[in-house]
Amino acid sequence: MSKKLIWTIVAVVAVVAIAVVAVFFLKPAEKNVEGTLEELMAKVYEGIPAENLPMLMDIPVDSENVEGFLGTTEVSYKEAVAKEPMMSSVPHSVVLVRLNDAKDAPAAVEKIKASVNPRKWICIEASNVVVKSKGDLVILIMSNEELAPKLEANFDNL
């Protein structure tokens, strides 16, 4: 075999090896979800009949109340909004958080999971707690067995 043929084979093998590594180990960055938090919150609740929900209101999340909604002040974010009952004995809370950077999402999800209190209503407890991310968006869902999966599915479809 000539040296030229050997170098050609080595180059082809190297290119194939790099392609295999790229396919299996390098995940493409997840795209950020476009829209305002209010628009996205409406999509999260889309298709859920009003009669299945308590009377809800949007609450801006800021440095004064973030710990009550997320259980921690250690998540750095651009903006956040919560949707909770105006008056109710129903444990229900949905919080959308737009992070400063999508690369912070895995750490933010873990911090919220570890910190949030599904008994924040004192006398009642949310039976389902979901924390997940999509791009730079994190959602915290605390609700019952009927609503939480629907809200989660809507978030997944954003």
Image: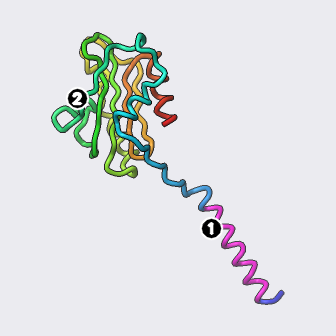
Side of 143 where 16 appears, left or right:
right
Indicate the position of residue 83 as horizontal and vertical percent values.
31, 25
Name the image quarter holding residue 26. Answer: bottom right
Q: Nearer the viewer, residue 3 or 73?
A: 73
| Helix, strand or loop: magenta stretch | helix
Residue at 42%, 40% in the rendered image:
133
Residue at 31%, 14% in the rendered image:
55
Q: Is residue 116 magenta?
A: no
Q: Amino acid at mark 2?
A: Gly
- Dot 2, crowdedness within 10 Å: few (<14), some or many (≥20)? few
Indicate the position of residue 79 as horizontal and vertical percent values.
28, 41
Q: Image height check: is 134 above or below 27?
A: above
Count of numbered labels shown in the rendering:
2
Q: What is the C-alpha distance between the residues marked 2 and 1?
A: 47 Å
Q: Amino acid at mark 1?
A: Ile
What residue sits right under mark 2 in the picture? 68
What residue sits right under mark 1 in the picture? 18
Q: Look at the image and tell me in which quarter the N terminus lies.
A: bottom right
Q: Which residues are magenta?
A: 4-21
Is label 2 or label 1 in front? 2
Q: Is residue 20 magenta?
A: yes
Residue at 32%, 12% in the rendered image:
90
Residue at 40%, 34% in the rendered image:
40
Name the image quarter holding residue 53. Answer: top left
Q: Image height check: is 73 above or below 10?
A: above
Circles 2, 1 touching at the beta carbon (< 8 Å): no
Side of 100 where 68 appears, left or right:
left
